[in-house]
Amino acid sequence: MDWMGLKEEHKLLRQDMKRFAETEIAPQVSDMDKTGEPQIASLKKFGEIGGLGILVSEEFEGAGMDLLSLVITVEELAKVSPSFALSVSAHNIVCNIILSNGSTELKKEYLPALATGRVIAGMGVDTMIHPISSGATEEKLIVNGSFSDIFGFVVKNDGKEKFIVIKNDKGLKEEKEMMGMRTSGICSFKPAEGTIKGNGFTIDSPGNYYSLMRILFAAIACGISQSSFEYSRSYSKERYQFERPIASFGMIRIILADMVSRSNASRLLVYQASSSTNIIDKEIATVFATENSLYVTDKGVQVYGGYGYIKDYPLEMFFRDAKVLEVFSGSADYRKVLIGKQLTS
Amino acid sequence: MKLAEFTDKHNAFREEVREFAKKELLSESTQIDRKGEFPWHIINKIKERGWLGVPFPEKYGGLGLDTTSYIILVEEIARVCASTAIMIAAHVSLACQPLYAHGTEEQKEKYLIPLACGEKVGSFGLTEANAGSDAGATETTVKLIGDKWIINGNKRFITNGTIADIIVFTASQDRTKKTHGISAFIVEKGTKGYEAGKEEDKMGLRGSITSELHFEDCELPKENLLGEEYEGFKVFMETLDGGRISIGVLALGIAQGALDYGIKYAQEHDLNGKPLYKFQWVQKIVADAATEIMAARHLIYHAAMLKDKGEKRITEEGAIAKLYASEIATRVCYKLHSILGEDGLTRKYPMERFLRDTKLMEIGEGTSEIQRIVIARQILGK
């Protein structure tokens, strides 16, 4: 299934990203998930092929592509490693805030290095308890925090948002022991007063970073769902029980049909939302895609049976990663209340 | 919650287990998961109380209580630490139970007594790499040569595998006969040709052991046959009729544990200056969870009480209870997780462990899909 709105350039990009994910990342995914070791070398390589500055204009050594291109990139990476896709998303969000709202000097100083991966960025993520845009001294959750060269987060003072970027030479230490997304170097960080003096920069009114983050998380969810479905489909054809492939049983066929319906519906919503200027479209797509990725991974584990519960097979990781993503998108039920509110106000 | 059918004895036993779990297990459960090591120090304390043989007569080393009491034990332990609970469940309902139901007097003397009184650990070897849902596809073979059984083959996903002293397992005497070619046997750790193998690296239940078993020209004396020849399928089908209630109650205990934490968290934390529990979306999650858990509890204990009465419809009702409890437990954990936001993702709170642990309950001792087949067969006929 592919969306009608995809252009030739999107399809070519998808092929490139798929190739990178399968050759560069796939061989080490399982080991890195176990150790939680960040995929820094792969990130650097990804920067070299232009994946870390998808939205950054060519003037600043970026790829100068559209949001849909970034969505497709992240989706393809997530099919192999959701955690790597999360790292790439965080980095690209920082790039985009600087690109859209930074001064010319900042753009010149940072964007070429970021877009090519010479500098890796981390980003504060949004959760219900620690919303990304919180007070200046409140705890933040930073993706890529343990290894990035710089990281950014948004704070709110007197109703005004400010984007703060800090140099991170030594890496953050307060690493979170997460159930999933284990190679994304997720750390907690509590800014002290005056943290940034001489150690970074700020951008006033960071703009609509929020909605970009959402749709990228949704794209990761789509990658997880699609990959979980594809793995389950192949497995169901290879796994014989009762002298038949389990794919020949009605009970398994229903599961596969449910998985692919939800996965396809999520992708269509996300592609469409990423081409829409309407913020609520992105919200709806995000909640739908992240919540359904829980369903799809859960059912994928069922298809695999005992093999879905162990780390030698891919579904176990997707199951854990999906849950982290749903929370990073703000907890589905909480978001639904906000959607309902926006729809009726 | 106290069901009307519980006796005072049941209620007192539950209180006793709950007290133990709170005092001895609550502070350990996170570490048990994190280290991924079998919690011998806890099991030793459980053993001292006789809880590794709850439903068996005292003359066989048990406590002489009923199945319902045993199910209460598993629920209260699972509520705090599912790794510990599944060890007990595999030991009691998969190893002791078939020995009790199908063993000869000599076998009960030799194997059930040390198991039920907790001196030894038991395990049940049915699943193989290519025989999961389809247990009739058992590839492990047995041949009677002279007066010895010779066993060859491998088992996989065996709870308590490497730590078990006494293992009840199945092997095929005649693979062309499929389910009707299977017999059940007893092997002891240390028997030549028998060895437990690699342990699985699992999503959850990381303090419990799941491993392979290997048999290579393993010789067993004739008297190690459990039940009749070619009736191994019957032995384990009956075993699983009861085993399903154990897995169901594990799910129930985990879901209740998750609800306990969800409630506490919602009462103690604010969101944007308002207590979490005052949000309707939180109330919905908690109310739905409490409703589903209550329904599961009724199904589970009804099945347990049917087993105590020796009623046949336990095949159907046990499967219904397991299917329902395990599916709602996953859903409940997912939802309660949301209340905690990212606190639910880290090991600061046990919520993420509950989710990882409970997922197995939809797989172990028959996946949800197999439960549906079992239920449908009972209702629609074969």
Image (cartoon, coloured by chain):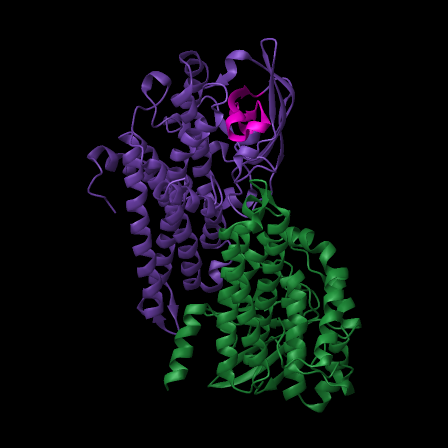
Q: Is residue B187 above or below residue B130?
A: above
User: What residue is shown at x 38% (from left), y 50% (from top)?
Assistant: B255
Judge whether residue B114 can be spotted in this image.
Answer: yes
Please name the residue shown 33% across and 36% down the image. B314
Report the chain shown in purple: B
Q: Give the magenta range.
A: B163-189
**Does B170 appear in magenta?**
yes
> Can residue A181 be seen?
no
Query: B226 or A187: which is nearer to us?
Result: B226
- Total numbered labels placed on residues in the image: 0
Which residue is at a point 53% across and 38% down the rendered structure image? B134
- Chain A color in figure: green
Give the x, y percent position of residue A175: 59, 59
Q: Position of residue A214 (x, y in %)?
A: 55, 75
**Closer to the camera in the image, A180 or A283:** A283
Q: Is residue A173 left or right of residue B270?
A: right
- Residue A187 vertical position relative to residue A60 in the rendered view, above or below: above
Give residue B270's position: percent from left, percent from top.
37, 68
Seen from the viewer's position, the closer of residues B163 and A270 is: A270
Is residue B112 part of the magenta span, yes or no? no
Where A294 sits versus B128, above or below?
below
Residue B151 at x, y = what percent? 61, 21
Residue drawn at (55%, 61%), measured in percent from left and top? A322
The residue at the far bottom in this view is A104
| Quarter of the image where the C terminus of chain B is located | top left
